[in-house]
Image (spheres, rainbow, N blue to C red):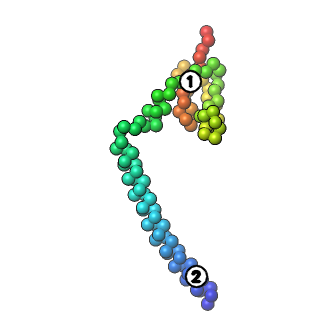
Amino acid sequence: MASSLLRGLMKSSKLALSATSTRRLSLVSTQISEHTAKWMQDTSKKSLLEQINKVPSIKVEDRIVACEGDTNPALGHPIEYICLDKDEPAICKYCGLRYYQDHHH
């Protein structure tokens, strides 16, 4: 008898949880879409790519550079080793910083 009572309680709690979680998910998705719509309408803010492109390319003397994203390791990203053999600037895949090799001929 106790086991059937326990099964009944578990079944009713699962139904209650699924209904409330569905309600919470729909509320969250509505909030996200409203936030995204507000952000997309505001043209005064520059996009992330526009902000990154404003940073000048970094001149490096070596063939390989190690990009950490920031001088403070807590604020940076995993070390990315970038080869600078090509003529055009190489871009860090994490932060978008551009590096080019200063050739001494």
Mark 2 to mark 1: distance in Å? Answer: 65 Å
Task: Name the residue: 53% across, 74% down.
Answer: 14
Instruction: Check the image and name the residue furthest to the bottom.
Output: 1
Residue 58's tag is: 1
Q: Earlier in the sequence, mark 2 or mark 1?
A: 2
Task: Name the residue: 40% across, 49% down.
Answer: 36
Give coordinates of residue 11: x percent, y percent: 54, 78
Instruction: Check the image and name the residue furthest to the top.
Output: 105
Query: Is residue 7 rendered to the left or right of residue 30?
Result: right
Image quadrant of residue 97?
top right
Instruction: State the count of labels.
Output: 2
Residue 7's tag is: 2
Q: Secondary structure at mark 1?
A: strand
For residue 69, above or below residue 83: below
Camera-side residue of 100 and 43: 43
Task: Name the residue: 54% across, 19% down.
Answer: 87
Give coordinates of residue 100: x percent, y percent: 56, 22
Give coordinates of residue 69: x percent, y percent: 59, 34
- The three-letter code of the residue at mark 1 reads Ile
Image quadrant of residue 99?
top right
**Which class describes the residues within 10 Å of circle 2: few (<14), some (14-19), or many (20+)?**
few
Q: Quadrant of the N terminus?
A: bottom right
